[in-house]
Image (cartoon, rainbow, N blue to C red):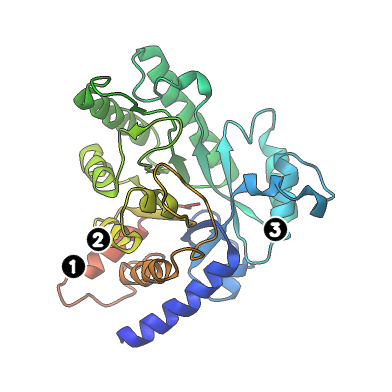
Amino acid sequence: TRAAAAAEADAFAQSLIAGGEGGVSPAGSGAEDPDSAAQAAGCPLAFGSRLNSMKDRLDLWQGANDPLGWVARQGQVRGLDVVDFNYPQHLEGLDVPRVKAALESAGLRAGAICLRFPKRMQAGAYTHPDPAVRAEAVQLTLEAGEWARALGAKEVIVWSAFDGFDYAFQADHRLLWARVVRAFRAICDASPDLRVSLEFKPTDENTRFFTVPSTGAALLLAHEVARDNFGLVLDMGHVLAAGESPAQSIAMVGRAGKLFGLQLNDGYTRLGAEDGLMFGSVHPLLALEAVYWLQEVGFGVEKGAQEEGASGEKGAAQGAAQGGEGAGP
């Protein structure tokens, strides 16, 4: 019943609020780990936290202050299953055996590799006016995919700080859009074994107007990219900054079968601001509704595991939302 589902969602939301800012993805994604905290608790989802957050309060940490030290510190956080690495920043100068050893020692696994394009691409990554830079951005994404495969992850998440514009009459909007579509098609076609996810954002200090600024625009992009392994990771702070309802965004993306993962956080939604606060700390009812709609769209539920809804569409959306083996943030 809806009452029972709401009660279950409420309990789930309380556990998320206690966990702070982090990410969630289907627990079946990526390498199987029967001893993971999520599976041991019977939860179908896998949880991670921002690796960069491990830089804070070093007075509480005696280990190394570097990416592998942050992995070790995350391993001490109860309930975490996966680590998402920013590429290239977190993995520069490291090799696969060292990273794998650090994950194993911490009792964690790689969830996804997240693109962070370098500052030299400030005029655009996939949308840069120079075709050589656009090609470099695509190649960097493919390199992130190689790291994902090597570490046993199944997903590359793209958030570009630079694909957009700042001034009126600065951009040919149709051209920028076409470049993004072509880039993602090329990446998906070169990486059929991986999930490729876009994490949209409406605005920030790097780019006032992003080429893909909303849930609706992101869904249009997914439609035009037209690849089964292309989907979306919804960042709750980005959704709120866009003036959207997180639950509605989850429902829309889930219905389209494109919900690959979520970044759970909160904020005060002041113009152009993204606070990155604990999930549910500012908008608890919106957080609760978001969790309810995660259940409604069957996020993390195996295909065919739930009955079809009255419209006959819900079951199809659930199966597609689960998709193959992928790991979100």
Q: Which label number is shown at residue 238? A: none
Mark 3 crowdedness (10 Å alpha carbons): few <14, some 14-19, many ≥20: many
The residue at the far left in this view is: 311
Check whether the beta carbons of the residues at disc 2 and disc 3 lie within 8 A of each other: no
211 over 156 or under it: above or below: above
Front position in the image: 39 or 158: 158
> Which comes before the other along the chain, label 2 or label 3?
3
Check whether the beta carbons of the residues at disc 2 and disc 1 lie within 8 A of each other: yes
Q: Position of residue 83 (x, y in %)?
A: 60, 50
Q: Find numbered disc 1 in the image and state the secondary structure of the residue it sits on.
A: loop
The part of the image, by quadrant, that contains residue 273 is: top left
Look at mark 1 in the image and give the residue it sits on: 313
Q: Position of residue 96 (x, y in %)?
A: 66, 37
The part of the image, by quadrant, that contains residue 92 is: top right
Q: Which label number is shown at residue 107? A: 3
> Which comes before the other along the chain, label 2 or label 1?
2
Residue shown at 27%/32% (left/top)? Answer: 181
- Side of 48 where 241 appears, left or right: left
Q: Amino acid at mark 3?
A: Gly
Residue shown at 61%/32% (left/top)? Answer: 89
Look at mark 2 in the image and give the residue it sits on: 255
Mark 1 crowdedness (10 Å alpha carbons): few <14, some 14-19, many ≥20: few
Q: Find numbered disc 2 in the image and state the secondary structure of the residue it sits on.
A: helix
What separation in Å lies between label 3 and label 1 (alpha carbons)? 39 Å
Front position in the image: 167 or 217: 167
Front position in the image: 140 or 304: 140
